[in-house]
Image: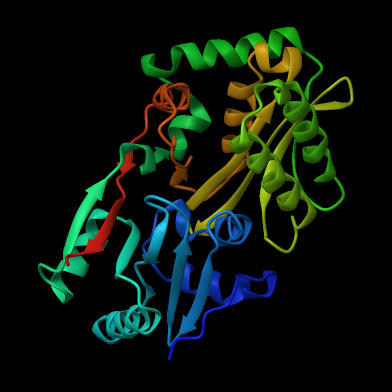
C-alpha cells in the first residue's frame, strides 16, 4: 500500500536525488515547485522503491497522479497506482504528462486513457547561451532593453543571492505586489505568498537567484532552482517601479543567466493561458515547448 504525505522540507534530499538521476526537463518535478505549490494543488508525495510518486487534487488539468519519476520496474509502480486509485474509489487520472511519458503510459496500459492537452500548460525551455548572450537579430530588442537599463542606471549593481541577502528579494516582491494590488487578482496573491515562502525557506529549498540594486535599493530579483545537472527552473522574476519600465526585467533575466555556469537549459515554466504572459515568453524565442497532457481512464 502506498503511503502518501504532504511534501515537507525534509523530503528535499531524496526527491532531488531521484530527479538528478532522471532526464526530466519539466518544472513540475522541481522540488521547490512541489513544495511551494503543495497547498494550491493539495499535493501529496510518496517515496516508493526508487521512484518519486506524486498525487494532485487541484482542478482541471491539475488533478491526478504525475507519471512516476525514477528507475526500476515501471509496470509494478503503475500497478501500485492503479490499486491506489481503486482503493480510494477514484477514476485513474494522470497530470503533467509529457509526450514521452504519454507514450510510456500507453505502452504499459494500452488504450485505457483519453488524452487532452492545454497549450497553457506547456513549459517554455530556452538555451542558456541565448539568454546569457542575447546575440543575434532575434534578440535585438531585448538587448536594447538591457542597454536602456544600463544607461538609465549606470551605477546599478547585480549580485547573486545567497546567505545574508535573500531578504532583499522579499523587498522587491513586496513592492511588486503592492504596485499591482488594485488588480484584485487571486492568482497574484497566491504567487506573492509563494514568493514570500520561497524567501523564508531559501536555504532549505536550495534556491538560487539574482538581485539588482540601484542606489543601494533592490529593484529587481529572480529566484530559481536546479532541476538536475544542466537544467534550471526560473520560478519567479520581478521588478517594480521605474526599474520595470526601463528594462529591469530584461536586465535581471540576462544578468542571472550570465551568472550561471555549466547550464544548458533554462525552464521558464508555463504561461497558464494568459496572452500577455505568452507573448512575453515567446519574445525570448524558446528552443522547445515541453507539451503536457492530461489523461483520464476510459469508462
Tell me if residue 230 can be seen: no
Residue in the picture at 47% in, 74% down: 18
In the rendered image, the vertical position of residue 142 relative to residue 121, given as above or below: above
Name the quadrant containing residue 22: bottom left
x%, y% of residue 234?
55, 43
Vertical relation: 111 (above or below) 256: below
Q: Is residue 116 above or below residue 298?
A: above
Q: Quadrant of residue 1?
A: bottom left
- Which residue sits at x=43%, y=40%? 270
Residue 6 image point, x, y percent: 60, 72
Give the camera-side residue of 13 and 151: 13
Horizontal arrangement in the rendering, residue 128 relative to residue 258 (left or right): left
Name the residue nearer the viewer: 66 or 288. Answer: 66
- Name above or below for residue 67 compared with residue 141: below
Q: Position of residue 199 (x, y in %)?
A: 76, 49
As drawn, is 193 to the left or to the right of 167? Answer: left
Amino acid at each position: 500500500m502506498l503511503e502518501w504525505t504532504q511534501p515537507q522540507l525534509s523530503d528535499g534530499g531524496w526527491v532531488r536525488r531521484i530527479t538528478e538521476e532522471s532526464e526530466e526537463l519539466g518544472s513540475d518535478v522541481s522540488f521547490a515547485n512541489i513544495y511551494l505549490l503543495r497547498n494550491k494543488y493539495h499535493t501529496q508525495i510518496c517515496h516508493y522503491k526508487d521512484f518519486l510518486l506524486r498525487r494532485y487534487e487541484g482542478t482541471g488539468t491539475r488533478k491526478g497522479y504525475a507519471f512516476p519519476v525514477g528507475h526500476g520496474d515501471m509496470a509494478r509502480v503503475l500497478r501500485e497506482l492503479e490499486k491506489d486509485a481503486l482503493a480510494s474509489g477514484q477514476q485513474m487520472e494522470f497530470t503533467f504528462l509529457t509526450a514521452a511519458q504519454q507514450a510510456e503510459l500507453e505502452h504499459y496500459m494500452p488504450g485505457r486513457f483519453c488524452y487532452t492537452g492545454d497549450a497553457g500548460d506547456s513549459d517554455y525551455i530556452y538555451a542558456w547561451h541565448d539568454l546569457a548572450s542575447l546575440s543575434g537579430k532575434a534578440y535585438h530588442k531585448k538587448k536594447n532593453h538591457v542597454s536602456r537599463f544600463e544607461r538609465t542606471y549606470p551605477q546599478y549593481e547585480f549580485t547573486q543571492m545567497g546567505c545574508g541577502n535573500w531578504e532583499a528579494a522579499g523587498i522587491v516582491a513586496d513592492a511588486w505586489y503592492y504596485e499591482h494590488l488594485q488588480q484584485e487578482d487571486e492568482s497574484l496573491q497566491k504567487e506573492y505568498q509563494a514568493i514570500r515562502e520561497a524567501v523564508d525557506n531559501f536555504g532549505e529549498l536550495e534556491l538560487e537567484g539574482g538581485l539588482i540594486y540601484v542606489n543601494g535599493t533592490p529593484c529587481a530579483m529572480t529566484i530559481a532552482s536546479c532541476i538536475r545537472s544542466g537544467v534550471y527552473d526560473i520560478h519567479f522574476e520581478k521588478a517594480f517601479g521605474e526599474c520595470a519600465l526601463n528594462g529591469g526585467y530584461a536586465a535581471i533575466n540576462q544578468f542571472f543567466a550570465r551568472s550561471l555556469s555549466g547550464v544548458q537549459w533554462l525552464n521558464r515554466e508555463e504561461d497558464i493561458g494568459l496572452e500577455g504572459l505568452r507573448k512575453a515568453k515567446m519574445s525570448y524565442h524558446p528552443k522547445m515547448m515541453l507539451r503536457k497532457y492530461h489523461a483520464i481512464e476510459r469508462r
